[in-house]
Structure formats: structure tokens, C-alpha cells
Image: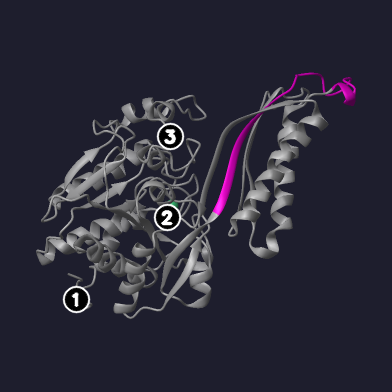
Amino acid sequence: MPLSPEIRADLGRFLSTVEASSGIGQGRPDGLSRLTLSDSDREIRDLFVRWCTEAGLQVSVDGMGSIFARREGSEDLPPVLVGSHLDTQVNGGRFDGVIGVFGALELVRRLNDLGITTRRPIEIVNWTNEEGARYSPPMVASGCFVGAHPVEWAHGLRDEDGVSIGEALDAIGYRGAAPVGGREIDSYYELHIEQADQLDRTGHQVGIVTHGYRSHGIRVEFRGETGHTGPLPMERRRNALMAGARLLVAVDDIGWEHAATGGKATGARLTASPNKAGILSDLAEAVCDVRHERPEIADAMRDRMLQAIQAACERTGCEATILDTWSWGGDIFDRELIATVREAAAALGYRAAELPSQAGHDAYFLAQRFPATMIFTPCKDGITHNNHELATPAMIEPGLNVLLHAVVARADRR
Ligand SMILES: [Zn+2]
């Protein structure tokens, strides 16, 4: 049965969870720097698990460290999964990911208050390493959950200090016993700040996410040769740093060429070794991505990005190896789930807009195997991955209530 429209989430209780989270892994003023599987990540996980246990939920942790907290339904059916991530970027905000996990917690707390048992179980999830800030690629645990990546491979991914995901999971005690994926779920909902400025600009209170920007990312290694920066003639140089730099500049240019239609391209990271004055670098690693709302344009941008690797090698005499590629987005979200969000927003009387997601999210991987969708709240000027990220209580409240009503309608459907 759908909930009666006067039933609303307890905003004060929800805000107290966000406030507690804001004190764990503080970064720059008002921001968070809570990298995945760090000590501060352990601290927020422990708190989240305690709150879930206090709410009477059955907590399990899978082999990738993702945390599931289950509220049983009246029937033995696959659960509706609801969640997001508690890790942040190096200079992250207080709301990215956090409102999706604690929005789900508030949802089950509200059902507890009301003594309502849904037909299907509801499970809250906190995915490991959504951000990709410590381990590339991002959304790696939700990718493993749907079978897009082997778990063994993910355990072997290493951070800048050489610590693998497997070792980091053990270090914070979150290598769980539950199998990674391999089970049916009914559907997946994720509440998230928009991370763009459309809702804030147009005064809409909630975003019905209909599709995702098609995105293609790569991590590339360039190999050259060390040499003296003085005497070595230009034509004999094989400077890997310059190969990486040329690729990233070319990718940035691709973004500018498509800027008028909302295309984006990012040179995100360049490392080199030895990376010292006086010597040419023989090793470099570059991370970059392109994205566009229209899949065929995004695909063409990807082809140009791959050609730019070739051009960088030809100019610098280096060799390139593509270490990782990732692609996501497109018309991936489920029509029936989108309809539950649309209906909940209408029943609650909110001004809602239908819009795409421009950022990558765990929901993109879930959508590969299960019906999935997202709900967006506005955020101030679209500022995110920045300590000035802000979603006021008034900005979050409509999305929180839409999540509650849409999930219960889905969980109760006949
Ligand atoms: Zn996020």
C-alpha cells in the first residue's frame, strides 16, 4: 500500500546523522577528506553499523567491504536495495553520498516508528570506494556486486602507497564474509545531491533522474627513457611526462570543442617518475575521461581520446599501455522505478524536474543487472567535490520524502 502523503521523514533526526558524519574525517573548513578504507572511514562505518543494529536491522558485510543492513518484509522476496556511499574525495563535501546512506537509514527508522512492515525486505547499502579517490577505478565495489569486475582483481588494486584494497579491508576489519553479489535484488534506489546546478537554478525541489551522461574513462601508462635535460638532442628524447601531458591537453581540447552542447572532458591525474629537475621521466601515468549526454557524441569523443594517445606517443617516442578503461551511463534507468519517483513527487506536491545525471554513481552499475534509479536533491550552485558543497535542510527534505514514498510503494507492490 502506498504511504499516506502526510507521512514524512523525520528531518531533524536525519540531520543529526549528517551532522555526526560531518565530524568524522574533517578536511578543509566545512569539508570532509574521508578516503575509502581509511581510519576515518572505519569510524563512520562503525557508527553506521551501530545505528543500523539499534534500528533492529540485520547487518552483513561482503568481501568488498560493502555494508548491507536488512529490514525484513512480510514475504520472502528479493529486497529493495537503497543506499549510496560514505567515502569522500580528498577535498570532499558533507553531502555527496552521505545523504543517500542516511536517507535510507531515516526511511527504515520512520517505518519502525510507524510499525509498518513492507511486503519486500528493504536493505540499506554503503558501497566501498565509490569515489575512486584512493583506488582507481571508482564505484569498484558496486561493479563487483553485479559481476562487472572480478573480486580478486579488485582486491589487488593498489593506492599510491602500495596498499591493496584487500590489505586495507583487513586493516580496518571490513573484509566481510558475505559473498559479493550473486543474489537477486528487486530494485535499487539512490538519493544523491545533483552535483550540477540545474535544480538550484530553476527552483525545482527534486530531480527525477531519467538517464546518465555517457562517460568513458581511461588510465594510461607511458614508458620512455631517462636522460639529461641539457645535452640530449630533442629528436633523441623519450620523455614520458610529456607524453602524458600531451594526452591530457588533447583531452581538455576535446572537452572545449563540445562545451557548447554540454560535453565535458577531464585530464584528472598525471604522475611521473623520476619527475625531477635535470632528468627526463621514463614513466608516467595519466587518467582522463570524456562525457556527453548524447551517447554517439560521447563515443566519438572517446575515439578522439584514444587517437590522442597515439599522437602523444608519435611525438614523444614513448610507448603506451592502457591499464584500465571504464564506461557508463546512457539510457539505463528503469521506467517503472522512475514512475514511482514521479508519482511520489506528485503525491507530495513537490516541484520536480526530469533530468540526467552527469556524474558517475553506483546506481549505474546496479542498473546493469537490476531495475535502478536515482533521486536528486538540489545543491548550491552545483558545487561538489569541494569543501563548499552545500545542500540546506530545505533542499534535502523533498528528496528525502520522495525516497521514503517511492521505496515503500515499490517494496509493497503486488
Ligand atoms: Zn557521490
Gap in angstroms between the C-alphas marked 2 and 3:
24 Å
Select label 2 or label 1 by which is in front: 1
In this rendering, is residue 38 above or below 412?
A: above
Residue 224 position, x and y percent, is 74, 22
Quick one: 412 or 280, which is closer to the camera?
Answer: 412
Residue range of the region highlighted in magenta in the rendering = 214-236
Secondary structure state at the residue bearing disc 1: loop
Of the two numbered discs 1 and 3 on the same chain, state the one appearing first in sequence: 1
Of the two numbered discs 2 and 3 on the same chain, state the one appearing first in sequence: 2
Residue 299 position, x and y percent, is 63, 49
Q: Which residue is mark 3?
A: 149
Tell me which amino acid carries mark 1: Ser
Tell me which amino acid carries mark 2: Asp
- 86 vs 281, left or right, is left
The structure residue drawn at horizontal position 48% and vertical position 27%, both measured from the top left corner, is 158
**In the image, residue 229 lies in the stretch drawn in magenta:** yes
Q: Is mark 2 within 8 Å of ligand 1?
A: yes
- Tag shown at residue 96: 2
- 339 vs 279, left or right, is left
Image quadrant where one finds the C terminus: bottom left
